[in-house]
Amino acid sequence: MRKKFLSVLLAGAMLFAVAAGCSSKKAGGKKIGVSMPTKSLQRWNQDGDNMKKELEAAGFEVDLQYANDDISVQVNQIESMINGGCKVLVIAAINGDSLGTVLATAKEKDIPVIAYDRLIMNSDAVSYYATFDNYKVGTIQGEYIRDQLDLDNAAGPFNIELFTGDPADNNANFFFSGAMDVLNPYIDQGKLVVKSGQKDFEQVATQGWKTENAQNRMDAIIAANYADGTQLDAVMCSNDSTALGVANALEANYTGKYPIITGQDCDVTNTKNMINGKQSMSVFKDTRDLAKQVVEMVKAIMDGKEVPVNDTKTYDNGVKVVPSFLCTPVFADANNYKTILIDSGYYTEAELAA
Ligand code: BGC
């Protein structure tokens, strides 16, 4: 009798141990595909590293791939993630419009897709979107220029030039309209003057967000409008890679007083430029927060729980409004970079040394 009781107890304990083992390893063996656009821009390396670290800490296996800014490479990589058994796909698209076909396959196989940072357009296969408040990024840049030039009080007029991002990146529209909703009233009043005349999104877009493309355009603008010593007061740049191109062109060919330059991302080179006075501000988007948020989404999906979102209205991809989680962007300049970038452990002091 006692023996029987003991063996029942033992069997129960074993069952419990197996069950506990299973739950602690719940995510074990579940593979998540993470598709990043390129290694050539600092932020995506950080995004990829953070995602991998966080997902692995949560017990997932990770297939992380970078597509070298080549759309067909990204499509192939996503195909291989689908065929390799990934249970969820996290994708920062190179071109928001070019993933429809491959994602249709994901949908057929019931693989949820999270658009990472950039919305994937015209596809009903996108389940969720995690990003920063992209419109707010632009607002912060526009308001900075407004306040620095004291546009509500100063007589002006002030000269400004405009640089935004890749037309195939839905974010670029949000950044640009966030900034221009602040600046346009002053342009309409004649207090801000775009001497080049290049004001429309298509005219001020920067193919591939590339530094050299922004630099070439700024070179041409300087030659045509500012080579005679005309003062340029501000350059609204939607991000750091374009701001870097503008700063390079100014350094090479502009002789007037250095203008206000905005940016976004707090890339190392640009943060150094802020410290040295070659860029006025940037918008810090803590990629660690975004990665954490996406991991929460992945866990909720895998556990069949409600997926955390905080915006169900803003991001219409042409087919559906994608439930989104928007993280908060933060203003950064030479005065606060130590607190937000170094004290928070994002960069070391040595990384930002000249
Ligand atoms: C991102 C920015 C980045 C840009 C260029 C955008 O989609 O939101 O942070 O600077 O792409 O890579």
Image (cartoon, rainbow, N blue to C red):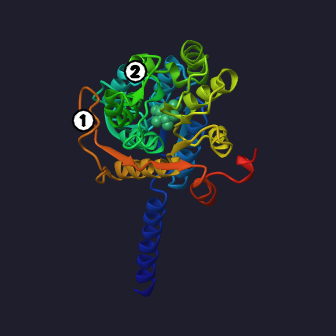
| Residue 252 location (% of width, % of height) | 69, 22
| Residue 232 location (% of width, % of height) | 54, 27
Q: Amino acid at mark 1?
A: Val
- Marks counted in the figure total 2
19 in relation to 273, above or below: below
Viewer-nearest residue: 122 or 132 = 132
Viewer-nearest residue: 244 or 345 = 244
Q: Residue at x 39, y 22 (%)?
A: 99
CB of mark 1 near ligand 1 (< 8 Å): no
Q: Secondary structure at mark 1?
A: loop
Q: Residues within 10 Å of mark 1 (few under 14, many from 20)?
A: some
Q: Amino acid at mark 2?
A: Lys
| Residue 3 location (% of width, % of height) | 45, 83
| Residue 256 location (% of width, % of height) | 63, 28
Which image quarter: residue 65?
A: top right
The answer to whether residue 20 of the structure is visible from this angle is yes
Q: Give the residue number, with chain letter if any, for mark 2.
A: 199
208 in relation to 284, above or below: above
Q: Give the residue number, with chain letter if any, for mark 1.
A: 321
- Residue at the bottom extreme, as displayed: 2
Spatial CA span between label 2 and label 1: 29 Å
Q: Residue at x 60, y 24 (%)?
A: 211
